[in-house]
Image: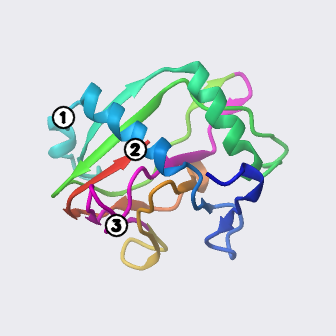
Amino acid sequence: QPHISDLQVEDLVPAQPGFLLAVDSFLSPAECDAMIGIIEQVGLNPPLLKDLRPKKGEALLNRESFAFSDPALSAVLFSRVAPFLPPDLEGRRPYGFTDRLRYYCYRKGHSFGQHVDQSIRAGPGLETEYTLLLYLNGQGEEPHALAGGETVFWKTAKEELLSFAPKKGALLLHAHGRRCLMHEGSEVTRGVKYLF
């Protein structure tokens, strides 16, 4: 695992600074494998029926998930993520994560249709600004060979801006709430996609 100071943040859309940020090798392969082991050991909740049959204007959401609270893990992860966050966002500074962490698992045929992520008010003067995704495996890697499952961002409902392919250990931060770009989790066509 490279030292955190050796990692580089890449601004994926320079025309919109700070909207989409990526860091390769943010997690080590051993950390990714340990998290996948936890997912497999704990088991995740199946997709909700309401998510599989969305109402008009809602996105299809077909994935397994598990939400939990772990203040110690949140603190450690935030200390590692903080150096890559913009130090100031409209006069506000990074503070921490929400109290809910989540594991996701997308199996063959699973996807998350076009949607935007909403901000969460976490207390007086506290509002979330980013969705953080940690990719625990990547395309073509064994033993969890994966095809598909890209996170796709859209300029418009029909014009693609960027497609981010899963890479083991990669961190992806994307602005949400009022700054959120329309995006989707494309269908997994082989294997399993593991996310935190």
- Which mark is nearer the camera, 3 or 1? 3
For marks 2 and 3 on the same chain, the one whose residue lies earlier in the sequence:
2
User: Compared to 147, does 78 lie above or below?
Assistant: above
Magenta stretch secondary structure, dominant: loop
Tell me the amino acid under the disc marked 3.
Gln
Which residue was labeled with disc 3? Answer: 139
Which residue was labeled with disc 1? Answer: 46
Q: Is residue 109 left or right of residue 2?
A: left
Local secondary structure at mark 3: loop
- Disc 2 crowd, CA 10 A, few/some/many (<14, 14-19, 20+): some
Identity of the residue drawn at 49% across and 42% down: 31
Q: Is residue 145 left or right of residue 195?
A: left
Which residue was labeled with disc 2? Answer: 33
Cα–Cα gap, marks 3 and 1 = 23 Å
Q: Position of residue 129 (x, y in %)?
A: 63, 44
Identity of the residue drawn at 21% across and 58% down: 191
User: Compared to 102, does 72 lie above or below?
Assistant: above
For marks 2 and 1 on the same chain, the one whose residue lies earlier in the sequence:
2
Q: Which residues are magenta?
A: 124-152
User: Compared to 99, does 127 lie above or below?
Assistant: below
